[in-house]
Image: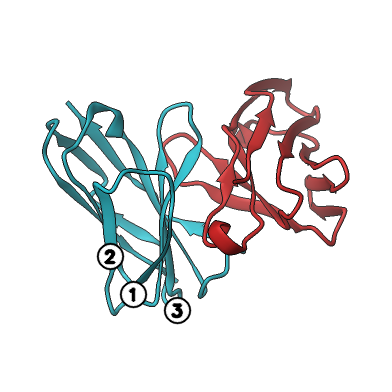
Amino acid sequence: EAGVTQSPTHLIKTRGQQVTLRCSPISGHTSVYWYQQALGLGLQFLLWYDEGEERNRGNFPPRFSGRQFPNYSSELNVNALELEDSALYLCASSLAGRGYGYTFGSGTRLTVV
Amino acid sequence: GENVEQHPSTLSVQEGDSAVIKCTYSDSASNYFPWYKQELGKRPQLIIDIRSNVGEKKDQRIAVTLNKTAKHFSLHITETQPEDSAVYFCAATPWRGSTLGRLYFGRGTQLTVWP
């Protein structure tokens, strides 16, 4: 069984630019979650998508947004990049709306210069 | 919302010794407590979890204990091995209302096991 896959693995962007990160969940999983892992800050919840709808979002500004497609894959968009957006962005998936047994992808390392 | 604190931030042990990592949570409604292991450059992996109706759970060398009254839970690793070296994260969630869909993570413990 393929795990959660994320692309790209690494990305370097300039402040003010926009970026799109992609995530494919485990087959059969309909819920996708996005987390930001900045150095020394643990994992901070960004967004939860299920059945194509945004179900919840964390305490991040509106320039962080995303969507989920009919095949349950998801993308995270970040506009007007700031230096502090540099972090590892992790996607996780689970069966519909169940927090039990989140499975994480390997993440996208975003560096903003 | 929920607030999870994790201690210590770093832990060094000799191979074969035991390691204990402790977490406290603030929301008494939290009912699910997973632990994740993240090796350098790799994804966080679920190693054990416990629900609020259980006080202790074991899986080989790993155990988790939960004290709902005191609102703390701990990860115990016995007979540590160098391959246990990683960052360990605890998490908690009430999984209801505005907390639906999210886990609240501690800041992590860097465990180093010396051969």
What residue is shown at x 40% (from left), y 61% (from top)? Answer: A4
Q: Which chain is red?
A: B
Do labels 2 and 1 touch, CB within 8 Å?
A: yes
With B106 as the anchor, is B44 left or right in this view? left
Q: Colour of chain A?
A: cyan
- Quadrant of the drawing holding the C terminus of chain B: top right
Task: Please tell me if label 2 and label 1 are on a single chain.
Answer: yes
Residue B108 percent coordinates (x, y): 58, 32
Q: Nearer the viewer, mark 3 or mark 1?
A: 1
**Badge 1 amino acid:** Gly
What residue is shown at x 72% (from left), y 36% (from top)? Answer: B23
Task: Please tell me if label 3 and label 2 are on a single chain.
Answer: yes
Label 2 chain ID:
A
Q: CA distance from mark 3 to mark 1?
A: 14 Å
Q: CA distance from mark 3 to mark 2?
A: 18 Å
Label 3 chain ID:
A
Q: Nearer the viewer, mark 3 or mark 2?
A: 2
Q: Residue at label 2? A: A67
Label 1 chain ID:
A
In the image shown, does B82 or A91 lie closer to the viewer? A91
Q: Residue at label 3? A: A28
